[in-house]
Amino acid sequence: MEQIISAGLDQLGLTARVPKDAPARLAQYGQMLLEKNRMMNLTAIREPEGVARLHMLDCAALLKFCNFEGKTLVDVGTGAGFPGMVLKILVPSLKVTLLDSLAKRLNWLTEVCDALDGVDSITTFYGRAEEFALEKQGLRDSFDFVTARAVAELRVLCELCLPFVKVGGQFLAMKSTSSDQELEEAAHAVKLLGGRVTEVQDYQIPGTDITHRLIVIQKMAPTLKGYPRRWAKIQKEPL
């Protein structure tokens, strides 16, 4: 995995921007993922090369479009830590919060952090995004970046994620290239929640013929009170 990741970072033009030991750390993280996946369903990808390319390099590609140095980021619905953990390993100065509704996933990610020497400034929150965005925990309107990877359709993601972004910050939605209609349907939600789509960037994952999409939504104004709504309402009546 280490060689694949190292070559992929070079192909993405990121080698000079990341720590020299980043490929080794990402490979260690990937190996821990594969081992844990035998006991807990963390990923459908079960081969080292697939983990290296479709998880590690896919997430690493975000560095082509954003400067994460010294910034704050919350990863909503982080799952096995994508993209939040990958970005933290690649950009040590990034302060990362991992949010997930399954405690055992977060417990495992804490074990990963402990195993990877030097990976710190990571906070985990167990619960639902819409609940944390409404509660007084200092999370609302407070992050430079919010990320989400294949969690839900964009209208739903905007309501879950934009409340966490501070004005001037960005919501980074990782999507497929077939998301044109989804993006069009989310226009009302983006505007209502204080955002504006500023970039739609397609990128190819190194060593594959797979192209993914990054949708960048800038936070222009604070999200109105009352959003996000309760999960049942979000599901039943997307914005």
Image: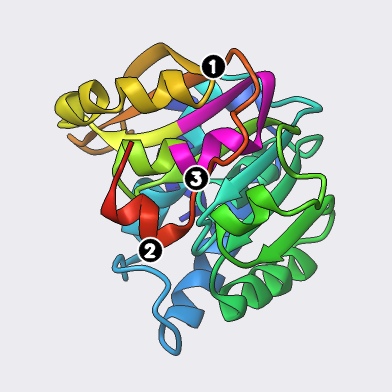
| x and y, in percent, of residue 131 in the image | 61, 58
| x and y, in percent, of residue 229 in the image | 49, 49
| Residue 129: numbered disc | none
The residue carrying pointer 1 sits among few (fewer than 14), some (14 to 19) or many (20 or more) residues within 10 Å by Cα, namely many
Can residue 96 be seen from the camera position used here? yes
The span from disc 2 to disc 1 (Cα, nearest Å) is: 35 Å
| x and y, in percent, of residue 154 in the image | 33, 37
The residue carrying pointer 3 sits among few (fewer than 14), some (14 to 19) or many (20 or more) residues within 10 Å by Cα, namely many
Residue at 67% across, 77% down? 107
The span from disc 3 to disc 1 (Cα, nearest Å) is: 15 Å
The span from disc 2 to disc 3 (Cα, nearest Å) is: 32 Å
Q: Of the residues tagged 2 and 3, which is closer to the observer?
A: 3
- Element marked by disc 2: helix
Q: What's under tag 2, amino acid-wise?
A: Pro
Residue 34 shown in magenta: no
- The residue beneath circle 1 is 218
Residue at 74% across, 64% down? 113
Q: Which region of the structure is painted magenta?
A: 159-172
Would you identify the image quadrant in which residue 194 lies?
Answer: top right
Residue at 45% across, 90% down? 39
Residue 161 shown in magenta: yes
| Residue 160: numbered disc | 3
| x and y, in percent, of residue 173 in the image | 42, 34
- The residue beneath circle 2 is 48
